Amino acid sequence: MSNQPQIQLPPVNFTAAGETDDLREANLQMAQQIPGYADATLLIADAIGKRVEQVLMDYTRDGVVMKYQIDGMWHELPRRDRQSGDAMLASMKCLGNMDARERRAKQNGTFKVQFMHVKGPCTLTTQGVQTGERAILDLTCNRVKLDRLKDLGMREKMRERIGELFDADKGLIIITAMPKGGLTTTWTACLNETDRFMRDFATVQSTTYSDPDVLNVAPNLYDPGKGETFAKAVRTLLLREPEVLVLPELKDEEAARIAVEQATDGERLVVTRIHSKGADEALLRMLMLKPPTDKFAKAVHCVIASRLVRRLCETCRQPYKPAPQMLQKLGIPVGRVEAFYKPYQPPPTPPVDEKGNPIPQPICPQCQGLGFVGRMAIFEVLVVNDQIRKALATKPKLDVLRRIVKETGHNTLQEEGILLVCQGVTSLTELQRALTQ
């Protein structure tokens, strides 16, 4: 009998993938028999406890580079040796009903986990790369749902204003954010604020569209692979005479023209989206798709822009007095704000006991020492007025638009973000990071 101590594994319950109960049970038993099953269990338990959204595993000849994504930021972990890393990945591939021996071709598999308060799917994607193999474990089960504008931190008056804008009978509403900057999240949250039960909402999407469905926004799909087009799908949909057109994919001039014409001549409310740095730039990005300029200027109703930032941990955040020069630069009157907040930073000289030994510093149980817990969005809502319309039709330049927008008293993303810094919700460095992405 072996004298080696048995590792007490955390109580993670797995449900393996497979088309039948027998296959799922066989895959689970096979995964448990692989030496890497214990490491896979420990990894997933640790990731769930630390609010990890994705785990990146880069396999090279010498080892495995490991990273956690938490609140949209990657954090590097200690490297793992190849032998234990290979066994761990093989075990997870078995759980996902994947070929554990295949290291080059792309594979996807989904298995379910239950641990602590978390229950749901994990998706494993593997692909051979030049240096070896890359694996990404997406802990969908561990993601915080941000389905409503309130979840994203939008204040009540702004939510009420957006509700009023979406009550319009016609016009074009544009939702915008940076690439990989929460556009899908903001898009879904905005649509969830609308009255989709009293009004007929319908959307046109290609079969390659991957965003989650929104309740009571009827999808109408077209397959580009079969020669089907966006224009034909819209014409077919219009026979039903929907009140609101939801068009998430304006990829060319024809699509932009259709959206603008439906928002003007068709007298419908049209909701679309585009990547940009802010509301003013979004207007110009739409014009780059070459819709009829005069009709676009007439149609556009408002732009909703967002940028994701991390929330400071309220348990361990540290206050500090901002310098007068900084307040002046941010446009804040001296004396208006007593303190800004920043993530916890340990003292430069660690405390020691009476014998001179370092005293271990406790890690914040709320943020696990990261200084941030969760994310929210900064929003700006630009309502298009006659001055902006005139500029769009005659002088569509960014500096002209920004000057006119500023004259209206509109709050930009930066100004909205500074307000969150003053409230201690996020830090100045985090705001700067988000705005300079």
Image (cartoon, rainbow, N blue to C red):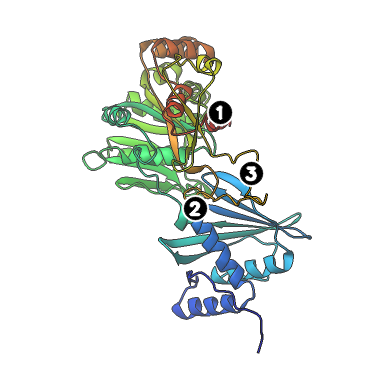
Mark 1 crowd level (few <14, some 14–19, many ≥20, 10 Å Cα): some
Mark 3 → mark 1, Cα distance in angstroms: 29 Å
Question: Which residue is more in the foreground, 301 or 121?
Answer: 121
Q: Which residue is mark 2?
A: 51
N-terminal-most mark, 1 or 2: 2
Question: Which residue is more in the foreground, 224 or 338?
Answer: 338
Q: Position of residue 260 (x, y in %)?
A: 40, 26
Q: Is residue 114 visible?
A: yes
Q: Which residue is mark 1?
A: 432
Q: Is residue 305 left or right of residue 239?
A: right
Mark 1 → mark 2, Cα distance in angstroms: 24 Å
Residue type beneath disc 3: Pro
User: For residue 430, which quarter of the picture?
Assistant: top right
Residue type beneath disc 1: Gln
Secondary structure under tag 3 reads loop
Q: Residue at x 39, y 13 (%)?
A: 409
Mark 3 crowd level (few <14, some 14–19, many ≥20, 10 Å Cα): few
Q: Residue at x 78, y 60 (%)?
A: 62
Residue type beneath disc 2: Arg
Return the residue found at the far left.
Answer: 198
Q: Position of residue 327 (x, y in %)?
A: 50, 17
Q: Position of residue 236 (x, y in %)?
A: 35, 41
